Amino acid sequence: MFLEVKNLSKTYTDKKFFGENKFNALDGVDFSMKDGESLSVIGGSGSGKTTFGRIISKLLDFDGGSVKYYGKDIKSYNITEFSGIVQMIFQNPYASLNPKLKIRSSLLEAFGAGAPSNAEDIIEKTLESAGLEKKILDNFPHQFSGGQRQRIAVARALIKKPKLIVADEPFASLDVYSQNNITEIFKSVRKNTGVSIILITHDIAAAIKFADRMIIMNEGKIIKDDSSENVFKEKENAYITDLLAAMEI
Ligand SMILES: Nc1ncnc2c1ncn2[C@@H]1O[C@H](COP(=O)(O)OP(=O)(O)O)[C@@H](O)[C@H]1O
Ligand SMILES: [Mg+2]
């Protein structure tokens, strides 16, 4: 199995003047995915989507359960090794692009310690996969629209040839046209590179358009893991019906 998550739990602790507040953001999450598989994660605000995405991207520690890639505990991967397995893309593309660096430098930086001698070739290929032209390399992030910046973030995420990209609300800050555009880019990146993509979104239309498999989260739990088609057909679960309605489909 490519990724196997068992009984995952995460508690956030807010320090108060008097004592602490504990909050269960993830509670007994079981999940697995095969090599090359892609899926969408939907759920209301605060349901634990980002927490889940950050944990499986090794950006956040957890309290209980296990996360394994290829049967090996996520904690025993070092950062260099892991950057070739999972890359995360954030809501705000500036989170992955340094505004002070030209795109070329940002992409070179993504190689980590020591770019290989064929770095330029790899960069050109990743640009192509993300539907970008080579001439953008000499520009700065602020010279691009939100949608283009997010594409550059996709190209940057591809540099280390990861097996999985976790994209957390990647179009939350974009207009509708760019949102559709990015969904298409994700689909073509998937096809051209074979990378798996987990798309976290509260945009259910995009979630359906993007993947055949869908996971619904609520209050730190996965309450549904099924084909997008079946999720849509789901009628017996009032919560899902309400959730879908609240998401304005
Ligand atoms: N750093 C934090 N400290 C305390 N509580 C947090 C922190 N991050 C998230 N939470 C809480 O955990 C829950 C899940 O958050 P999150 O994973 O961001 O959900 P989502 O991405 O689905 O909106 C929310 O109730 C949120 O308020
Ligand atoms: Mg979130």
Image (tube, rainbow, N blue to C red):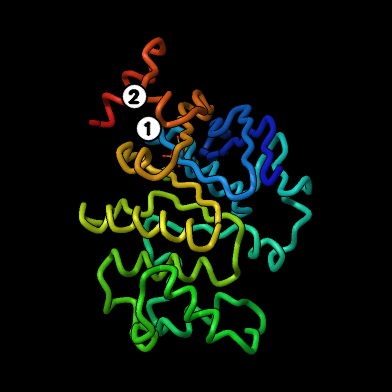
Q: Nearer the viewer, residue 94 or 235?
A: 235
- Residue 131 on image: x %, y %: 36, 70
Q: Amino acid at mark 2?
A: Leu
Q: Nearer the viewer, mark 2 or mark 1?
A: 2
Q: Residue at x 38, y 20 (%)?
A: 240
Residue ranking furthest to the front: 191
51 and 109: which is toward the camera: 109
On the image, numbered disc 1 is attached to which residue?
A: 44
Residues at circles 2 and 1 in contact by the CB criterion of under 8 Å: yes
Checking the image for residue 243, the label placed there is 2
Please state the horizontal and vertical placement of residue 46, each as a whole percent of the image: 42, 35
Mark 2 crowd level (few <14, some 14–19, many ≥20, 10 Å Cα)? some
Q: Residue at x 49, y 76 (%)?
A: 125
The quadrant of the rendering that contains the C terminus is: top left
Secondary structure at badge 2 equals helix
Element at label 1: loop
Disc 1 marks a residue whose amino acid type is Gly
> What is the distance, in whole Å, between disc 2 and disc 1 at their CAs?
7 Å
